[in-house]
Image: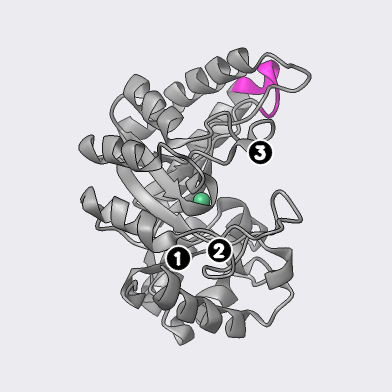
Amino acid sequence: MASINKLAINQITNDPVKSDKLVEIYKEEGVPLITPWRNKLEEDGITAKAFRKMVDDAGIEINGFCLCGFFAEKGVSGRQEQIDYNKRTIDFALELGAPSIVTVAGGLLPDNKDLDYSRKFNMDALAEVLAYARDKGMRLGLEPLHPMYTADWSVVVNIKDANDWCDQLGDGIGIIVDTYHVWWDPRLQDEIKRAGDRNRIIAAHVSDWLLPTRDLLLDRGVMGDGVIDIPRIRKWLEDEGYKGNYEVEIFSEENWKKDQAVYIEHIKQRFEEFV
Ligand code: ZN
């Protein structure tokens, strides 16, 4: 049973709510930590500085920040543009006072089926962005995603890949363990141990895998609604010395239709029971 003071909620979980209203609801509901998205804050016309004041006034802490990555998205010719966008994201996170940034590797280059080339392309671009983050003292958290996102989100699809990338990339980058993406992996415990030995577990995300899953992106379940043994993974993390928070990150069209304050109550109950 996880204690509510370890509860972080990722902003995407309550996607329909405007950023300023969300901080109000989290304050009312006693949610202690939030992970905002740069594009959401920008959409809502809120600067990093203004959001920081908002959460400070509400007594809420920043757990992380979304999102670095997507290096291949605009093709070879768009490489520099993506790198520059990532650097601005790092600046934004610094102003916000976020401890780290969720980082995805990026998928396949457009119109290109050479997966090895896309892996190399993404890693090289990430190395450049990491050098910038390192200079600024911002930590990146590489999050391996489920293999079904290889083409569009991430060529890093399990914790072994993420550990291998971190070994190559060096200091300043760690790993985010998201139960939704890694629960199926027979090497999970061993690779969590490997990450723990190198002191690189930065954050943990939780949600559940629904059976059946009806949408590749927008059908994640609330903890307890699916098949993932979250406490077991949590134990493996804590056996490796992880003392951080657990961030609820649920992309879900179904749950976005609900009254979000009521939904957050439900998440809190499930957090205590199933994390
Ligand atoms: Zn995640």
In this view, the residue in front, 251 or 62, is: 251
Q: Which residue is mark 2?
A: 11
**In whole angstroms, how far apart are the C-alphas of marks 3 and 2?**
23 Å
Q: Are marks 2 and 1 in contact (CB under 8 Å)?
A: yes
- Under mark 1, the amino acid is Ile
| Position in image of residue 235 (x %, y %) | 30, 57
Name the residue: 69% across, 21% down: 109
Spatial CA distance of label 2 from label 1 is: 7 Å
Residue 71 falls in which quadrant of the image?
top right
Q: Which quadrant: the C terminus?
A: bottom left
What residue is shown with label 3? 148
Residue name at image x 35 percent, y 36 percent:
191
For numbered disc 1, what is the local secondary structure? Answer: strand
Give coordinates of residue 149: x percent, y percent.
65, 38
Label 3 with label 1: CB-CB less than 8 Å: no
Instruction: Looking at the image, tell me whether mark 2 or mark 1 is earlier in sequence order.
Output: 2
Residue at disc 3, secondary structure: helix
Provide the residue designation for mark 1.
34
Closer to us: 59 or 224 = 224
Task: Please tell me which of labels 3 and 2 falls first in the chain.
Answer: 2
Residue range in magenta is 73-79
User: Does the Cβ of the disc 1 residue fall within 8 Å of ligand 1?
Assistant: no
Q: Residue at x 57, y 35 (%)?
A: 85
Quarter of the image with the N terminus is: bottom left
Amino acid at dot 2: Gln
